[in-house]
Image (tube, rainbow, N blue to C red):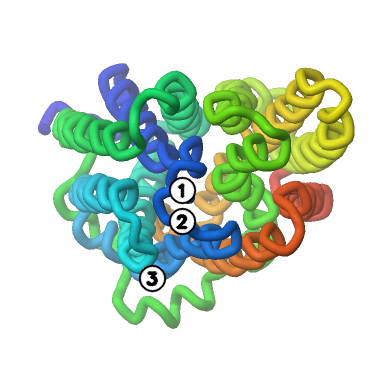
Amino acid sequence: MKNFKTGIYTKSERNYLSLIFFLFGISIMSLAPRTPDLKSNLSVNNGTFGTLLGSASIGSIIMLLIGGQIVHTIGAKRAMQIGSTVIALTYTVLVSTSSPIIFLFCNILAGSGVSIFHIASSGHSLHRQDEVGKVIVPKLHGAWATGAMSTAAVAFLISSQVSISTHITTLMVCFWLLTQFSLGKLTPSFPEKPTADDSYRANSIKQFKFKINWFLSLGFFCASIMEFTIADWATLFGKEELGMGSSVATLSYLIYLIGLIIGRYSIGWALKHQSEQFWIKTGGLVGGVGLSSMLFTASVVVDLNQNLGYLLAFLGFFLAGLGSSALAPIFFSIAGRLSNGKNALAVAQLSFVNTFIIFVAKNILAWIVQISSIMIALVITSILMAALIYFGRVGSTERQ
């Protein structure tokens, strides 16, 4: 403890903090490539299934109202311990139940667990980034994306042989144990009691309301809706609308994540050569136009040449991942820069409006899927992402 220096970012700290983000990605994205199995367990239609998936946002919204204050009160380490426990328990129930009511209740709890972990981990990493004076957040988001990609790859390999219950339950046990271990190793960088300057007083909701940057929040919604929609529907799109087998369909999400991770690990280099504003606008263009054009072409071609149709769809998901890759780290960095040091609160504020709008949007998209098709929902998402050509001006015009 006494040897810890806030201005030094050691290799050990970097590795364990990266592992925490990696495990977070593995855990919370583990259900995305197995959505057909979840839907089969529940025996519901697409509209109801999408609504049930979106219910996690209710827990997220509640937690985001108070999460920043909780983290600044109990500290990031304890908040992540609580969050990881809630995630592990609720995800285990989600994959074991056939009751939509139980699924709904547990998914709301899961959303609250994910949110408190997200606020604590992102707030802490932004705080450390300020202390050490170097960019560390993009690589941590890259570690998260690597975890998400790894969980999709595992699903591709085992989904046809291993039940979703066995798969996810085993994963959750490993996630919880390794997260507790990693947090213990990082104890020096998590102060037990936040300083007075870093605290957030309890007349919180009123202050919270007036501190929302609406232009930033709406831009972040357009930047993040793609990630949520693809997580919910990419695998089902491949299986139900292009006729892929169960294992092949998981590649839709896996290839999206490959694009995401390539971009995430290139952000530091990219921001040295072009500004935040440039990459936000470029990401919106590449992801939005790339996905919609490739999926439309794939849906036309697949009946004539199945393999070509699959390849075009995969290319579209890859471009969506590549376009999305820089957006979350950039928007969180902008929020942190505008927060006057209250980084966990900044993450909560930015995420709150985003989660609320996404909750509404995901439910609307679910019933658009029910009355039309998954492709229409993905095209609508692509249009929203392309709107970043306008919202990109929220970013800095300076290179880092």
Disc 2 marks which amino acid? Ser
Contact (Cβ within 8 Å) of mark 3 with mark 1: no
Is label 1 in a helix, a strand or a loop?
helix
**Residue displayed at 44% across by 39% down:** 29
Q: Is residue 184 visible?
A: yes
Residue 69, percent from left and from top: 31, 65
Q: Is residue 317 left or right of residue 258?
A: right
Tell me if mark 3 has few (under 14), some (14-19) or many (20+) residues whose alpha carbon lies within 10 angstroms of its own. Answer: some
Q: CA distance from mark 3 to mark 2?
A: 29 Å
Query: Looking at the rendering, in which quadrant would you find the C terminus?
Result: top right
Of residue 324 and residue 309, the one placed in the foreground of this image is 309
Disc 3 marks which amino acid? Ile
Tell me if mark 2 has few (under 14), some (14-19) or many (20+) residues whose alpha carbon lies within 10 angstroms of its own. Answer: some
Mark 3 vs mark 2: which is more N-terminal? 2
Query: Looking at the rendering, in which quadrant would you find the N terminus?
Result: top left
Say which residue label 2 marks. Answer: 43
Contact (Cβ within 8 Å) of mark 2 with mark 1: yes
Disc 1 marks which amino acid? Ser
Q: CA distance from mark 2 to mark 1?
A: 5 Å
Q: Is residue 134 above or below residue 102?
A: above
**Residue placed furthest toward the left:** 2
Q: Is residue 338 left or right of residue 6?
A: right
**Residue displayed at 17% across by 33% down:** 177
Quarter of the rendering containing residue 230: top right
Q: Is residue 373 above or below residue 248?
A: below
**Residue displayed at 20% across by 48% down:** 85
Name the mark on residue 62.
3
Say which residue label 1 marks. Answer: 40
Q: Is residue 160 left or right of residue 323?
A: left
